[in-house]
Image (cartoon, rainbow, N blue to C red):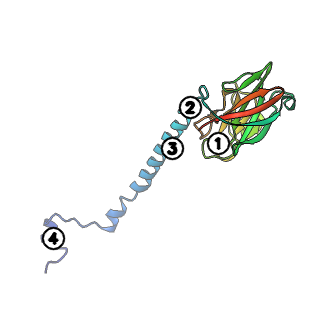
Amino acid sequence: MTDPGSPQRAQSGYRRLSRRSLLSYWWTLPVAGTLGTFGWLGLRAGRILTRKEKPGEPEYVPGAVQAIAPLADFPTEWHSLEFSYQGDLTIVLRLPQPVLGGISVGEQHFAAFSRRCTHQGCPVVMVRDQEVLALAYNYRAEDAKHPQLGCPCHYSVFDPLKAGEAVFGQATLPLPRIALEVRGEQLYAVGREEG
């Protein structure tokens, strides 16, 4: 029987690691974990900041015609009304300027969006206060001093004047738009974007 510490065993190419030498390599685990985490965070941040999809010309899928409200219910710019269309939470806004996918009636401009955030589906809300956007959502844009649509779950921000584009946060896709029509003095929803 061969003694484990014998020269014959050492010559066979087997090198016995002591606890001390094994523990001297443990520092590589937290370093590798830290580098991997920062690498993943950098890739994710780059994706979130640079790959936001801009809304194009809408491709509406016709749906049921649903009355929303009389035009008189929108007396001022940024007046909003939440409603349900085809089982989805939606919001219609009177805006100060026309937007892609919206509708204009004289000097009045309207756009409607799904309230379901494109990140994970939480309902977005109208955020009118710029300080709330800055403090709660960590979003302050010098060129956007108007209300925004914000997701309170993960703090994505969508700009209604940019046709619902995701301008900040983890969402990268714009909010789906709702097709609007005016019949007489009444505003109607007549279709929606799939997305």
Quote the CA–CA distance across marks 1 and 4. Answer: 66 Å
Task: For mark 2, give the secondary structure.
Answer: loop
Please give the label number shown on residue 9: 4
Q: Mark 3 or mark 2, which is nearer to you?
A: 2
* Rendered image quadrant of residue 30: bottom left
Earlier in the chain: of badge 1 and badge 3, it is: 3
Q: Mark 4 or mark 3, which is nearer to you?
A: 3
| Amino acid tagged 3 | Leu
Q: Nearer the viewer, residue 43 or 99?
A: 99
- Residue 107: where, in percent of width, then height? 80, 19
- Residue 128: where, in percent of width, then height? 78, 35
Task: For mark 4, give the secondary structure.
Answer: helix
Q: Which residue is mark 3?
A: 41
CB contact under 8 Å: marks 1 and 3: no
Earlier in the chain: of badge 3 and badge 2, it is: 3
Where does the C terminus fall, quadrant-wise?
top right
Instruction: Please report the residue visible at 47 percent of the width from the left and 45 percent of the height from the top.
Output: 40
Q: Which residue is mark 1?
A: 117
Q: Which residue is mark 2?
A: 53
* Rendered image quadrant of residue 147: top right
100 with respect to 70 (left or right): left
Count residues near mark 3 (Cα–Cα under 10 Å), then give few for <14, some for 14-19, many for 20+. Answer: few
Instruction: Please report the residue visible at 73 percent of the width from the left and 25 percent of the height from the top.
Output: 103
Q: Is residue 181 above or below residue 88?
A: above
| Amino acid tagged 4 | Arg
Q: Mark 1 or mark 4, which is nearer to you?
A: 1
Task: For mark 1, give the secondary structure.
Answer: loop
Where does the N terminus fall, quadrant-wise?
bottom left
Earlier in the chain: of badge 4 and badge 2, it is: 4
Q: Nearer the viewer, residue 98 or 151?
A: 98
Earlier in the chain: of badge 1 and badge 2, it is: 2
CB contact under 8 Å: marks 1 and 2: no
